[in-house]
Structure formats: C-alpha cells, structure tokens
Amino acid sequence: MRVLLADDDLISRAVVKALLSKWGYEVLEVGDGIQAWDILKEKDSPQLVLLDWMMPGIDGLELCRRLRQLDNNTYHYIILLTGRDSKEDIIGGLNAGADDYITKPFMPEELEVRLRVGKRILDLQQSLNEALEVQRYQAQHDLLTGIFNHAKILNILEKELYRARRQNSNLAIIMGDLDHFKKVNDTYGHVAGDAVLAEVARRMKNNIRLYDSVGRYGGEEFLLVLPGCSTEEAIIIANRILESISQEAVMFNSTPIAVTISLGVAMKAVGDEKTTTAELVQLADAALYKAKQNGRNRVEQAAEPSP
Ligand SMILES: [Mg+2]
C-alpha cells in the first residue's frame, strides 16, 4: 500500500521513511504542505497519509481540512505527526479531519500498529465500494443477458426523450420480440431458451451504435433506444439486428437453434414536444404487432405521432 509522508524535518522524515519501507509500504515523501496538497488533490493519490502538523506552506491541520472538503470519492486515512500533545491540540487535529495522531517522539511499534489500523479501514472501505458497485450493476442489468433491465431501459428512454426535446432532435425506439419463442423452450428446454436470449442480446449489442441502449423489456422482448435517429436510420439498424439473428442459428450444446425476431420502430420527430415515453412505447408495440401480423421475421414502422 502506498503512503504519502509529508514532513519538513529531514531527519524525522528519513527515519519514518526507513521504517515504512521496512514494513513494506511504498513511500512518497515531500518536505512541505504545498507539495503534499499537489499530490493529494490528484485522483490517484495515496490513501494512507502521514502528515506532520507543523510545516511551511500549508500545515498538516489545514491539509486535513482541505482533504475533507475535496469530493473525489477517495477516502484518505490521515495520521497527524505532532509534537503537540495537549488535549486541546489533539481535539483540534481530530476536528480538522484527521483520523488519528501520533505524538513525537514515538515508538516505531506504535506507528506500525496505527498504520495497520488505517490500512484495515481503507481495505474495508474498498471491499464495501466493490460490493456497492456490484449491487448498482445488478439493480440496472438483466443478469441473464447482461443488457439493461426493464426499469433501467425505461429510465434511459425517459432521459433521452427529455434530452431530445431540449436539443430539438430525433429519438427512435425499437421494440423487438422473438418469434415463437415458446416453441424454443418447449422443444429444447429452458436452459437452451436462456442461451438463445443471451446470444440474441449479444447480437443486438453488436449491431447498435456506441450511444444506443438495449434492454430486456420482458421475457423475450427487447427495447432499444436510439438517440438522434430518424425513422429511416432506425429501420436500417432494426434490419441489421433482424439479419444478425435470422442468418445464423444459435448453437446450444452443438444443436443449432434457428430463431427469428419481429421488430417495430417508432420515432419522436424534431419539434414533437408532447409524445410521452408511454406513448412512444405503445407506438413501437403497435408496429411490432403489425410485423407479427404481416408474417414475422420483419420490421415495421409506426405512424409518426402528430407533433
Ligand atoms: Mg514540522
């Protein structure tokens, strides 16, 4: 683990640095508060920080305050090194945002133990952050296919519709539904059905633009949100998706499973200020229904909503 050591006293710094290196820490050392601040305000700064209280430029106390005001999602565990040991000083240091303090002169063992506490807290915080990250991912994604889930894709549509109105641009959506998917489940089993869904989602993702979004709307239904897209462009994308699915069977345990998809395209045009997300979804749904009626494995477009 990396440690930032800031101390203007050369000898004391050399002693602490030698100890830190011996204990396996990677040490970054500076001789004043200004250099310390330059490092600490960067995104990738060491999270374990040893600050001398009295330093030229910016003192340790002020550095604590600044670090706590810095909102960059990184927690710094700060230990103040100080010659002061009155109760008032200690309270002042902790109030400024220090996590701990050590009074000089100190025993190496004491520093070692206190650093270990800091490291433990930082490690805990990191695993907490990772767990939160996993949770955030799971709250927004469909775990079978890895694409957005129902709630998230609608949330994206809502935001994009708002943006399209503000920027006065187009917004197209595509609703897709696998044809006769029940038959796949009945014939090959649900595990095979799941594999088909995952593969279809992968092919969809491969055929959209970087800023488009795809989500699993329901069982075998998919919703795509295409910002800035005209109906013509959306139809091209829909056909690309259709072909990527119909042209090559999905392989499941060496068994080819042929599937096709029907797609409905709807668009909010420039100047349209009133179409809601629900109406847009309904329009795409109606177009999808038309595609089913007209023989499946095809793309249909909705009538444009009147602006
Ligand atoms: Mg000093």
Image (cartoon, rainbow, N blue to C red):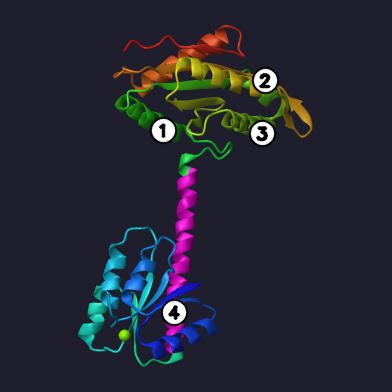
Q: Which residue is mark 2?
A: 246
Q: Going 55% across and 40% down the picture, which residue do you hit?
A: 143
Mark 3 beta carbon near ligand 1 (under 8 Å):
no
CA separation in Å, label 2 and label 4: 61 Å
Q: Which residue is mark 3?
A: 195
Does the CB distance between marks 3 and 1 fall below 8 Å? no
Q: Is residue 79 above or below residue 168?
A: below
Check disc 3: other Cα within 10 Å, few if <14, some if 14-19, many if 20+.
Answer: some
Q: Position of residue 271 (x, y in %)?
A: 31, 17
Q: Going 38% across and 71% down the picture, which residue do you hit?
A: 77
Q: Residue furthest left?
A: 88
Does the CB distance between marks 4 and 1 fall below 8 Å? no
Q: Going 58% across and 38% down the picture, which residue do you hit?
A: 144
Instruction: Give left or right: position of 204 versus 59.
Output: right
Q: Position of residue 269 (x, y in %)?
A: 37, 17
Prevailing SS of the magenta stretch = helix
Q: Which residue is mark 4?
A: 115
Does the CB distance between marks 2 and 3 fall below 8 Å? no
Name the one closer to the observer, 145 or 246: 246
The circle drawn on residue 156 is: 1
Name the one closer to the observer, 31 or 203: 31
CA separation in Å, label 2 and label 3: 16 Å
Tell which circle, 2 or 4, labels the residue nearer the N-terminal end.
4
Mark 4: amino acid: Leu
CA separation in Å, label 3 and label 4: 49 Å
Mark 3: amino acid: Ala
Query: Secondary structure under badge 1?
Result: helix
Mark 2: amino acid: Ser
